[in-house]
Image (tube, rainbow, N blue to C red):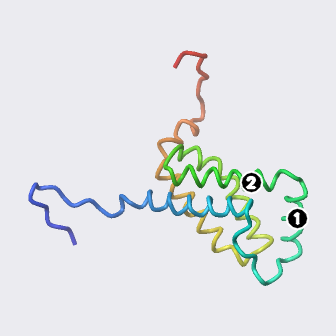
Amino acid sequence: MRHADDAKGNRPESISRYFPAIARILMGLIFATTGLNGFLNFIPQPKAPMPERAAAFIGALLQTGYLFRLIMGTQLIVGVLLLLNRFVPLALALVAPIIVGILTFHVFLLPSGLHFALAVLVLEIYLSWAYRKAFRPMLAMRTKATEAGKE
């Protein structure tokens, strides 16, 4: 059903115009929270023990001394950028490999969290599509380098 035109002859704006902002804020909250939790451990651990291979994987990340902190720091930065609506395409590009890691972790090692991983993947794909104009130059098959100082 179409809405009647208002007094000025304009159609009311569709609610779908808010979807990218809602998805961006939701994804920002997820990554800011999980990234911060990686440093402060404020989210309680599940009572059920983690499967052995999943625990071994997390243990290996922690044993490196840097990789777990790098992943959590990246998630925190991405979350903040998304929440502040700053450098959104860059944030989406930075978090894409982390999302692949999250997805494969849940597919192969901890299937109980797969629904959450898929939800994050859907948000990433949707936002990447919403910001597709920013990604077009990156996806060009051939391009020329610019000289310093010339554009």
User: At which x and y percent is residue 110?
Assistant: 77, 74
Q: Secondary structure at mark 1?
A: helix
Instruction: Kindly identify the residue that appears in the image at 61 percent across and 22 percent down.
Output: 145
Question: Residue at coordinates 86% horizontally, 59% vertically from top-left?
Answer: 62
* Amino acid type, callout 2: Ile
* Left or right: residue 67 compared with residue 75: right
Amino acid identity at mark 1: Gly
- Label annotation for residue 130: none
**Mark 1 Cα-neighbour bin, 10 Å: few <14, some 14–19, many ≥20:** few
State which quarter of the image contains the N terminus.
bottom left
Q: Which mark is residue 59?
A: 1
> Judging from the image, what secondary structure is the residue with disc 2 in?
helix
Where does the image place residue 90, in percent across and percent down from the top left?
A: 58, 43
User: Which residue is the extreme one toward the bottom?
Assistant: 48
Per the model, the C-alpha gap separating discs 1 and 2 is 14 Å
> Which residue is label 2 attached to?
71
Frontmost residue, 85 versus 122: 85
Indicate whether 21 appears above or below 105: above
